[in-house]
Image (cartoon, grey):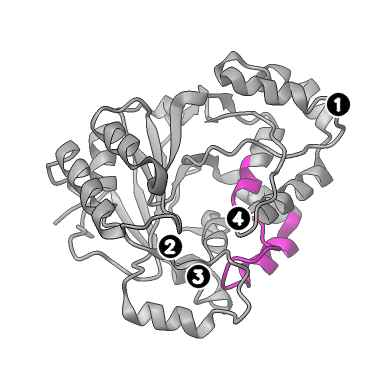
Amino acid sequence: MESKIDFIITWVDGSDSTWIEKKKSYLPKNDSGLNKDSRYRDWGFLKYWFRAVEKNTPWVNKVFFVTEGHIPDWLNVDYEKLIIIRHDDYIDSKHLPTFNSNVIELNFHKIKGLSDFFVNFNDDMFINKELLPEDFFEDELPKDIGVFSPIVPKRGSISSIVQNNVEVINDYFSFRRVLGKYFFKFFNLKYGKHLIKNLCVLPWSNILGFYDNHIPVAYKKEFFKILWDNEGELLEKVSGHRFRQKDDVNHWLIRYWQLCTGSFIPRNIKFGNYYDISSELMEILSEIESPQYSIICLNDGDGVVNFEDDKLRLLDSFERRYPNKSRFER
């Protein structure tokens, strides 16, 4: 693909005492359980994220580093490929400060200079193999997985937010028409056993949900603008939520819109994998040093008991895999 592709990564220094006090001063007394401290915990992996980007995707145009204002002291802010974006550079001041990742991500299209084609990373998502631009976009369409999957309600999870996404999608799209128009994008052998899910939802007339595999999402910026044009009131309301709430929507809503308009190219289901650090530490260590997947997501949850020990073991594995400084570092 000839068009330029940017990466966006969002990051917060969860150890900054000033930020912690600010967060506490705004945190509602009756929190929904969606804003646990583990969401903001820093494992020290960020420099390896940049090293992996430079080694595995040297073709990337720019990396947009989105932060409230925290800048790691080792980060080379003068590197031409690195663009520092603070929340107040693109989010309406009346919505700041925000501690809500949904607000930060739903407003990405307002970032000055961002390419029309970009990939959204969380800081727990790592490029694990050498990749080409065509691994994210092909014929100027995002690579993605068109698999339907019912939403499973779970206390303390984002299932309510995902349900809100799907409610919006059902307001605009007919399940039958989507399947009829883009049948071979949803019934594709690249999805492997997950094709069964698409078969199982056929009796229903509405969209029940989508399979979300927790890896970076490739976006065409125009779809953010389309959602804001159609659901501006909703997105403006969510942008006013300083913390995640059950009545939020998130950036997956834009992803679902891309899927329902057939604006994607089917991707192999084994492109990426999601790991839980608390229960799959040994598998993660093995995956970092002997990669099987192109992308990995390392989830940090409340189940992590030995945080410092696990952190040291993971840092050691990353250091062995990526021992050399990148140009993103001083």
Mark 2 lies on residue: 38
Residue 23 at x, y percent in the picture: 46, 78
Q: From which residue to which does the magenta span run?
A: 231-255
For image coordinates 64% across by 37% down, the residue present is: 258
Precedes in sequence: disc 3 or disc 2: 2
From the viewer's perspective, tell me whether residue 287 is left or right of residue 120: left
Distance from the alpha carbon under mark 2 to that under mark 1: 39 Å
The local secondary structure at tag 4 comes to loop
Vertical placement of 281 versus 24: above or below?
Answer: above
The one nearer the camera, 290 or 82, is: 290
Which residue, given by chain and number where applicable, does mark 4 sit on?
157
Tell me, yes or no, whether the highlighted magenta stretch contains residue 6.
Answer: no
Q: Which mark is residue 99?
A: 3
Q: Note whether residue 57 is visible.
A: no
Whole-percent x and y of residue 168? 77, 50
Location of residue 165 in the rendering, given as x and y in whole percent from the top left corner: 70, 50
Would residue 254 be counted in the magenta stretch?
yes
**C-alpha separation, residue under disc 3 versus residue under disc 2:** 13 Å
Gap between marks 1 and 4, in whole Å?
A: 27 Å
Q: Position of residue 328 (x, y in %)?
A: 21, 51
Q: Nearer the viewer, mark 1 or mark 3?
A: 1
Q: Which disc number belongs to residue 203?
A: 1
Q: Viewer-proximal residue, 179 or 36? A: 36
Q: Residues within 10 Å of mark 4 (few under 14, many from 20)?
A: some
- Alpha-carbon span between mark 3 and mark 4: 17 Å
